[in-house]
Amino acid sequence: MRQTQLFTKTRKEAPADEVSKNAQLLIRAGYIQKEMAGVYDYLPLGLRVLNKIQNIIREEINAIGGQEVLMTTLQDKAVWEKTGRWDDSVVDNWFKTKLANDGAELGVGNTHEEPITQMLTHFVNSYKDLPVYVYQFQTKFRNELRAKSGLMRGREFLMKDLYSFDQTEEGFKAFYEKCADAYRKIFERAGIGHITYRTVAAGGSFTTGLTDEFQTLSTSGEDLIYIDEEKKLAVNKEVLTDENLQAFGLDKNNLREEKSIEVGNIFPLGSRFPEALNLKVKDENGVERPIIMGSYGIGLGRLMGTIVETLSDEKGIVWPEAVAPFRVHLVILGNSPEVAVAGDLFYEKLKTLGVETLYDDRDLRPGEKFADSDLIGIPTRVVISEKTLQAGKLEVKKRTASEAEMMDESDFLKSL
Ligand code: ATP
Ligand code: MG
């Protein structure tokens, strides 16, 4: 994409009320736009990152047998009353609305355990219909009390939510571990695997016992975790008891305290939702059995915000290759016609080769172009200038490197 065609512009300053690093950088670089606190638009650059994150998650969840659906935002009060979660005193962050004709109340979805369980009653009748693993990418609405963390805590945000339905406890546990593995791969591919820990955490009032969170180390995190580096396992402060440490074979003296961000979680839910919504099956002996359920969430914006919080530097964003909006940032310097022709030619060549390229063909001073390039954070910058043309080379700089190097075009193309 040519930067002269990109309607967004970089900004020197983020909005004054924006305190989080992820929102400041993402707004300044033109990835997102703030509508109001906790509510953001994704702009062309931001949507490319979001789509890459979504594809990584989709591939890994499909690989463990997830079937993708898309459920509705408007939710039936009656379904939620059956599980006792309609009342604001039980779930306090609901947005609710009313029908125009009869004034009936509707929920604006904050999660989907109830609707998805209800939906399956139309399809799951026998033990032969199980297991079922269903997921979606869907916008959730939550009336969060505090929304000062940019993309990490939105009032409207895209979530991957996966729900598992198994006939046996063993089947459930096997899938739960598969999902934990898939999460590891997702965070690895998204570039934060090395700082992300599976973490023992408290179950909410609707889970059974302990749950697992995936926590990424960050000084801007809201959680405190205690890490055993060797085991690559952590315990959330909220469940740090001698009993739990013992259960997971952890020694208090080996644990390191860190602040962290919950990028994802997995919950054992037992049979509570299937029972309340009358989803049950007969086993091979004709005996009615409860269905064992789990739910598994990842906030896509939170993941994007976490990458920015943890990997950026004083100059701007540093995208890992797999989620970067473009692979190469091609920058031409000066306004000589030769440079423009060489830039255009190389841009066309990269396009033909399928290398996603942002082409800075704007008429700006080099300093401004470099500052923008660092702020936007594409992994590889290639400069074409009179100097590089004279040398017959390209000037190549990785976003993570301090120095540029002069390379032959053929060597550079091979390096991709
Ligand atoms: P938190 O404790 O941070 O509020 P939660 O326990 O409410 O999170 P879930 O309801 O289980 O989280 O949601 C699943 C995932 O969705 C979380 O792990 C997180 O990645 C993401 N998420 C939750 N709330 C938000 C939010 N307000 N904005 C963006 N992402 C969110
Ligand atoms: Mg929450």
Image (cartoon, grey):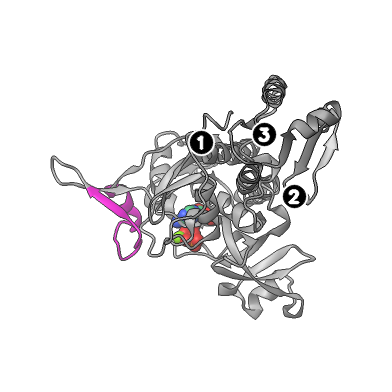
Q: Quadrant of residue 369?
A: top right
Name the residue that disc number 3 marks: 334
**Where does residue 374 sit, x and y in percent of width and height?**
65, 47
Q: Between tags 1 and 3, which lies in front?
A: 3
**Where does residue 88 sit, x and y in percent of width and height?**
30, 62
Q: CA distance from mark 1 to mark 3?
A: 27 Å
87 or 256: which is nearer to us? 256
Q: Is residue 101 magenta?
A: no
Q: Amino acid at mark 2?
A: Thr
Q: Closer to the N terminus: mark 1 or mark 2?
A: 1
Asked whether the beta carbons under mark 3 and mark 2 sit within 8 Å of each other, the answer is no
Q: Secondary structure at mark 1?
A: helix
Q: Closer to the N terminus: mark 1 or mark 3?
A: 1
Q: Closer to the N terminus: mark 3 or mark 2?
A: 3
Residue 299 shows in this picture: no
Quarter of the picture holding the N terminus: top right
Q: Is residue 81 magenta?
A: yes
Are there few (<14), some (14-19), or many (20+) residues within 10 Å of tag 3?
A: some
On residue 44, which mark appears?
1
Asked whether the beta carbons under mark 1 and mark 2 sit within 8 Å of each other, the answer is no
Q: Amino acid at mark 1?
A: Pro
Task: Please give the count of numbered marks on the rendered protein.
Answer: 3
Magenta residues span 77-97
Are there few (<14), some (14-19), or many (20+) residues within 10 Å of tag 1?
A: some
**Where does residue 230 sit, x and y in percent of width and height?**
80, 66
Is residue 308 shown above or below 350? below
